[in-house]
Amino acid sequence: MAKRPPFDSTQLTRRAEELISAASNRYRITVQVANRAKRRRYEDFDNNMDDHQMKPVMRAIFEMSDELTQPEIIGDI
């Protein structure tokens, strides 16, 4: 039997669209999501190998969409 993912795919899509629409540069926000996912992947690997409920890219999208109230996340690094 297949496991149900711990997230709602429509919510993930909505949050990704919010990130892209709030960003001034689609490429830059995509790179920021990828970099955060890469960083989180290695942090998760070092800390807790058996807790992989959500893929790093999905987790990065959720985290960054939660941080939309902070304009520096979308601004220049």
Image (cartoon, helix red, strand yellow):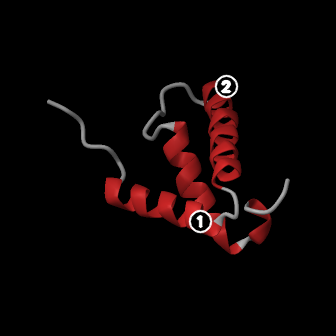
Q: In this view, does 25 lie above or below 4?
A: below
| SS under mark 2 | helix
Left or right, 53 with reference to 18: left
Outermost residue, left side: 1
Q: Note whether residue 45 is visible.
A: yes
Q: Where is residue 77 in the image (x, y as percent from the top left)?
A: 85, 53
Q: Note whether residue 8 is visible.
A: no
| SS under mark 1 | helix
Residue shown at 66% from the left, 63% from the top? 23
Q: Mark 2 points at which residue?
A: 46
The answer to whether marks 1 and 2 mark residues whose Cβ atoms lie closer than 8 Å is no
Residue shown at 36% from the left, 52% from the top? 7
Indicate the quadrant where residue 54 lies: top left
Q: What residue type is labelled 2?
A: Asp
Residue shown at 38% from the left, 61% from the top? 11
Q: Mark 1 points at which residue?
A: 66
Q: Nearer the viewer, residue 63 or 23?
A: 23
Q: Is residue 41 above or below residue 29?
A: above
Indicate the quadrant where residue 42 lies: top right
Q: Which amino acid does label 1 sit on?
A: Asp
Q: Is residue 57 above or below residue 19?
A: above
Q: Nearer the viewer, residue 74 or 63?
A: 74
Q: Is residue 6 above or below residue 16?
A: above
Q: Position of residue 46 (x, y in %)?
A: 67, 25
Left or right, 24 with reference to 15: right
Q: Where is residue 70 in the image (x, y as percent from the top left)?
A: 74, 71
Residue shown at 47% from the left, 33% from the top? 52
Outermost residue, bottom side: 69
**How packed is label 2: few (under 14 Cα within 10 Å), some, or many (20 or more)?**
few
